[in-house]
Image (cartoon, rainbow, N blue to C red):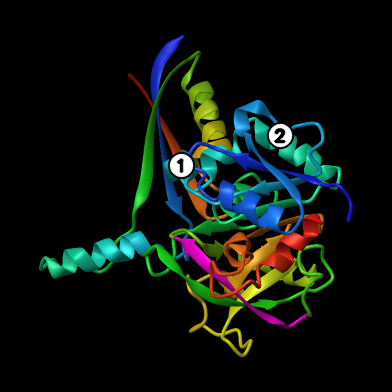
Amino acid sequence: MVDVTVSVVQFGGSNCDRDAVRALSYLGVEAERVWHEDGLPEDTDGIVLPGGFSYGDYLRAGAMAARAPVMNEVRAAADRGVPVLGVCNGAQIGSESGLTPGAFTTNASARFQCEPVFLRVERADTPWTAAYDEGEVIEVPIAHGEGRFEIDDEAYEDLVDDDRILFRYCDAEGAVTDAANPNGSTGNVAGVLGERETVAVLMPHPERATLPDVATSTDGAGVLHAFR
Amino acid sequence: MTAYTATVTVRLKRGVLDPEAETTRQALERLGFDLDGLRSADRFEVDLDAPDADEAAARADEMAERLLANPTIHDYEVAVAER
């Protein structure tokens, strides 16, 4: 195992930063919370944009944090190949900042949804999914009001052609259906890659499905293995 | 320099689901109103000084491009008036 220090970037209103640090530490990954105004430490070789409600979700979820100065550092690190993971609000920040394609907006239900969901692993040859098999079904919780993945038709086709969809919402058997789509996401998309495979965002919370005895599953740990 | 108010209206692109508007429509119907549809939009009124209206509009346009709207889901329009 290499020595990796993951910076978990904390914005005002982030609330999954401690969970991310704890889950990573459990997996043997050195991780620390970094206040966004302090900038990224020099030894950062992994970045988590954690969940929460940065800036109170004002304007649009993630819109303000995406334009915070630290995101220039995050983008520069991503361009150097440093792994960057955005979870939930972090996914919204990632898409708002242009790190990943599409947008996450109001759930079709117009409700905040906090529940376990099943995800089908669309690719197993990325750092985020190497722990799984392609087509494997994993159980990870969601907790969001604005998680509906929206993207125009042409850009969606590009996503599919470029194989940049990581996870889709599915049922327990792995069938990608409308009934298994918790928020009305285009193509049941739950997580996508950026231009580099080392950049990923997803609405479900892998850090809430890592520690034993916390959630109903520990399936999320595989995503965090990317930082090991 | 002239004082302007630039009004930026940001709305969802046609065809993008608007659950908040749908919920609002249902609430209006529960109150007994008869309506065929409802769309919602965000409106920002930006007070600024600029040499002319075109310059004021250009600055408001850039604000919309860089923050107020998300081009993936939104269209926007800018209207400028002297204040």
Q: In which quarter of the image is the N terminus of chain A?
A: bottom right
Q: Quadrant of residue A196?
A: bottom right
Q: Mark 1 points at which residue?
A: B77
Q: Which segment did they paint magenta? A: A134-144
Query: In the displayed structure, would residue B19 be above or below residue B49?
Result: below
Q: Where is residue B76 in the image (x, y as percent from the top left)?
A: 47, 45
Q: Which chain carries label 2?
A: A
Amino acid on which disc 1 is placed: Glu
Q: Where is residue A99 in the image (x, y as percent from the top left)?
A: 70, 49
Residue B34 visible at all: no
Of circles 2 and 1, which is in front?
2
Give the residue displayed 37% in from the left and 64% down from the top: A110
| Secondary element at tag 1 | strand
Q: Mark 2 points at which residue?
A: A72
Give the residue displayed 37% in from the left and 40% down from the top: B43
Q: A77 or B64: which is nearer to us?
A: A77
Q: How crowded is mark 2: few (under 14 residues within 10 Å), some or many (20 or more)?
A: some
Q: Where is residue B2 in the image (x, y as percent from the top left)?
A: 42, 12
Query: In the displayed structure, would residue A211 be above or below residue A119?
Result: above
Q: Which chain carries label 1?
A: B
Amino acid on which disc 2 is placed: Asn
Q: A175 or A160: which is nearer to us?
A: A175
Residue A44 located left or right of residue A69 = right
